[in-house]
């Protein structure tokens, strides 16, 4: 049995030990956490909620089979420029972000309508740096364009943007390019249009047909001789537009914070506030479409290069040569044969069929239950290729940027509509006016 002195010593020692242990646990975070966690129940593993995979879309096809063989016919003879025609140095810029078939259709339509290929500049705004130039992307990739075909077969120029740009930023890139290349005026066009010469139109002065390009040149000449202060000439609104570089520079270019929709309202209203005139002109047919023709050969105004047409042409050739050695002949669509089908007549039945087809395509875009811009998300991308971006996420990001741009416009002008001058607003009111 412990004596009273020894018992007191034991109790004192035990109390000291417990005090030291408590202080150690409190002052040592790692040990304290370990002890606490030892008695704390384990937290459940976080649950991720993943969106369902989108419904697979059918693969797209190239809409110009003959071009895949590096062989295309001459443009329609009535749209070709006379040898003594002096084309003005006023280039056409066409922007691209997604959907190669629509871009190719637009480029081919302008070329076959008579626009000189060496004055067409495709602005690659895919945001993929030099991947298209280096053939690093494939057809199912929404950002794919055939750089080699554009530059060597169609002979147009391709310029890459340094990053993916919004609509307003892209317009400022156009302006930058014009200033860099010392273009006092330039044209631009959307990548989802089809341009055609009006084959039923005759010049009131001469009674002769003129292509859409020569009519554009006439408007350009008249505009440059115009004494009033002008900034824009619209052709079917901005499906094709002529811009005066100095006017946009004076106004500071496009507002980069109004990214997409309403950016044109902001720019056009500011130009008119500054006393510039915005005019309209009609030069031909420019369709706004979201789908592609099955075969772009129809824009060259020739019979389709089907095997039957090509075989018929070959049969005539064999008869002329007196040979029927079928197994030794060249492929139907080889570049050396250039079998394209017979030229069609100006304004003939096939032209009327083409007009009806394009009318239907334009109506479908306007009436499509899914919206006008479904063409922008037709491809689902190719994982593993350069600059891959989830296509659903890309589209959603664009939509969010659009909404932010609209909100910026509302904050800048205290309202949504385009009629800023009708509300008595001027340049000095930007960011100053408050909602009523």
Image (spheres, rainbow, N blue to C red):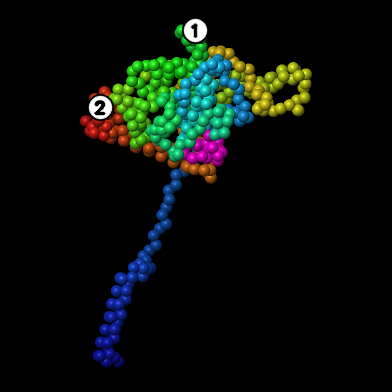
Q: Main secondary structure of the magenta part?
A: loop
Between 6 and 135, the one nearer to me in the picture: 135
Magenta part of the protein: which range?
126-145
Q: Position of residue 365 (x, y in %)?
A: 45, 26
Counting other residues with Cα less than 10 Å from the Cα at mark 2, is it few (<14), some (14-19), or many (20 or more)?
Answer: some
* Residue 91 seen in the figure: yes
Name the image quarter holding the N terminus: bottom left
Determine the residue positioned at 39% across, 60% down: 43
Between 63 and 125, the one nearer to me in the picture: 125
Between 169 and 260, the one nearer to me in the picture: 169
For this view, does 409 lie left or right of residue 328? left
Determine the residue positioned at 27% across, 92% down: 3
Callout 1: SS: loop
Counting other residues with Cα less than 10 Å from the Cα at mark 1, is it few (<14), some (14-19), or many (20 or more)?
Answer: few
Above or below: residue 324 compared with residue 20: above
Q: Earlier in the sequence, mark 1 or mark 2?
A: 1
Callout 2: SS: loop
Q: Which mark is residue 433?
A: none
Determine the residue positioned at 44% across, 41% down: 393
Location of mark 1 (residue): 207
Tell me if residue 135 is in the magenta stretch: yes
Q: Which mark is residue 425?
A: 2
Circles 1, 2 touching at the beta carbon (< 8 Å): no
């Amino acid at each position: 049995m412990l004596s009273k002195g020894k018992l007191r010593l034991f109790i004192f020692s035990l109390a000291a030990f417990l005090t030291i242990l408590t202080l150690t646990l409190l002052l040592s975070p790692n040990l304290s956490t370990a002890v606490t966690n030892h008695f704390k129940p384990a937290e459940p593993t976080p649950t991720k909620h993943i969106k369902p995979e989108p419904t697979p879309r059918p693969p797209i096809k190239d809409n110009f089979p003959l071009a895949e063989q590096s062989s295309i016919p001459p443009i329609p003879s009535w749209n070709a420029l006379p040898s003594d025609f002096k084309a003005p140095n006023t280039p056409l810029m066409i922007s691209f972000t997604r959907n190669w078939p629509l871009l190719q259709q637009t480029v081919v339509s302008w070329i076959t309508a008579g626009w000189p290929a060496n004055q067409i500049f495709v602005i690659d705004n895919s945001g993929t740096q030099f991947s298209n130039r280096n053939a690093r992307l494939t057809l199912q990739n929404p950002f794919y364009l055939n750089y080699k075909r554009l530059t060597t077969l169609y002979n147009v120029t391709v310029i890459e943007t340094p990053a993916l740009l919004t609509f307003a930023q892209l317009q400022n890139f156009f302006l930058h390019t014009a200033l860099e290349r010392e273009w006092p005026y330039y044209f631009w066009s959307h990548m989802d249009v089809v341009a055609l010469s009006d084959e039923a139109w005759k010049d009131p002065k001469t009674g002769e047909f003129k292509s859409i390009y020569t009519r554009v040149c006439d408007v350009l000449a008249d505009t440059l001789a115009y004494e009033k202060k002008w900034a824009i000439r619209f052709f079917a609104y901005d499906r094709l537009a002529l811009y005066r570089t100095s006017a946009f520079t004076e106004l500071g270019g496009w507002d980069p914070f109004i990214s997409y929709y309403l950016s044109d309202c902001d720019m056009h209203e500011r130009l008119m506030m500054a006393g510039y005139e915005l005019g309209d002109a009609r030069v031909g047919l420019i369709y706004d479409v979201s789908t592609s023709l099955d075969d772009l050969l129809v824009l060259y105004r020739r019979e389709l290069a089907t095997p039957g047409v090509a075989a018929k042409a070959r049969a005539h050739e064999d008869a002329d040569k007196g040979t029927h050695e079928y197994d030794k002949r060249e492929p139907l669509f080889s570049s050396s044969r250039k079998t394209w089908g017979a030229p069609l007549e100006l304004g003939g039945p096939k032209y009327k069929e083409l007009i009806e087809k394009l009318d239907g395509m334009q109506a479908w875009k306007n009436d499509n239950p899914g919206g006008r811009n479904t063409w922008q998300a037709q491809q689902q991308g190719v994982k593993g290729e350069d600059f891959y971006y989830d296509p659903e996420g890309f589209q959603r990001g664009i939509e969010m940027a659009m909404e932010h741009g609209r909100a910026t416009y509302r904050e800048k002008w205290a309202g949504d509509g385009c009629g800023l001058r009708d509300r008595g607003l001027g340049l000095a009111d930007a960011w100053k006016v408050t909602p009523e």
